Image (spheres, grey):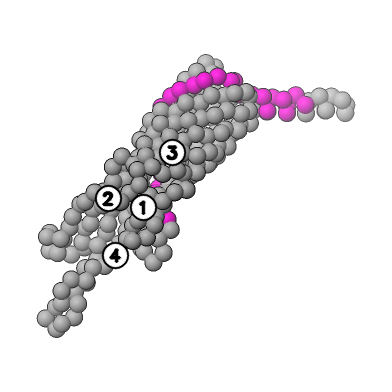
Amino acid sequence: MKKISASFCLCLIFHVCFCQSPGLRIGPTLGLSQSMFAPLPGITQESKAALSGGLSFSDQLNHNVGFETEVLFSNRGSLIEGTKTDGTDLFGNPKNYTYTDNYRLLYTDIPLLLKLSLGIGSLHFKAIGGVSANFNMYSTVTRRYDDPDYNASNSYRIPLDHVQFFQLAAVYGLGFEAENAQNNIFSLDIRANNDLTPLGKVDGKLAYSNWFGIHFGFLFL
């Protein structure tokens, strides 16, 4: 009985650890996330919805270890609130106008990720981690004042000339993959992108563009 139990456990472990078929795959990927700048002490900030999409390449070296790289077009940014003092009222008191700065950043991201996977049958759980080379393609800030009359003549939209063209980021996450009979893979993971180098200055302070979200993909063998 003990031998049978031991053999069953060994077979189960083998099946769990050696389940994903090796091979080079390519396919589309789409990501939905929330982004914001960090760290910006003393500044009121709200996260902003971000979207990314592109192509994913996966090279499964063996049943448990593989590499992934992607070419993603990713937009992100943040909403920063502030107050501007401009002029005085009839009693000599300063006039304060609240505003929201909408930062829009467009990047080409090229992450290189190590993937470790385990699973049962066609379902594989994975952990990913690595670095990403992020290239800034476009960046603007749009200011809108809450006072409509003041906003009519003082709102603006300008490019951000001080944003660094290249940023390096750490990327990591957890997810799962489902493999069909043709060895194609549907993937879903929750991942984070934390900048290792600053994007530049926001309100005179060094800022990093970070995001956290969910990614979907379909990989063809």
Write the residue at 24% across / 49% down: 159
Query: According to the image, label 2 marks what residue?
Result: 160
Write the residue at 44% across / 49% down: 197
- Outermost residue toward the bottom? 91
Secondary element at tag 3 = strand
Alpha-carbon span between mark 3 and mark 1: 16 Å
Q: Earlier in the sequence, mark 4 or mark 3?
A: 4
Looking at the image, is 57 positioned above or below residue 106? above
The label nearer to you, 4 versus 1, is 1
Q: Residues within 10 Å of mark 2 (few under 14, many from 20)?
A: some
Alpha-carbon span between mark 4 and mark 2: 18 Å
218 and 180: which is toward the camera: 218
Alpha-carbon span between mark 3 and mark 2: 20 Å
Image-based side of 152 in relation to 63, left or right: left
Write the residue at 40% across / 37% down: 109
Three-letter amino acid code of the residue under disc 4: Gly
Image-based side of 102 in relation to 30, left or right: left
* Residue stretch in magenta: 10-38
Query: According to the image, label 1 marks what residue?
Result: 200
Q: CB under 8 Å between callouts 4 and 3?
A: no
Report if residue 36 lies within the magenta region.
yes
Q: Residues within 10 Å of mark 1 (few under 14, many from 20)?
A: some
Q: Earlier in the sequence, mark 4 or mark 2?
A: 4
The label nearer to you, 4 versus 3, is 3
Q: Which quadrant: the N terminus?
A: top right
Three-letter amino acid code of the residue under disc 2: Leu
In the picture, residue 134 is in which quadrant?
Answer: top left
In the picture, residue 64 is in which quadrant?
Answer: top right
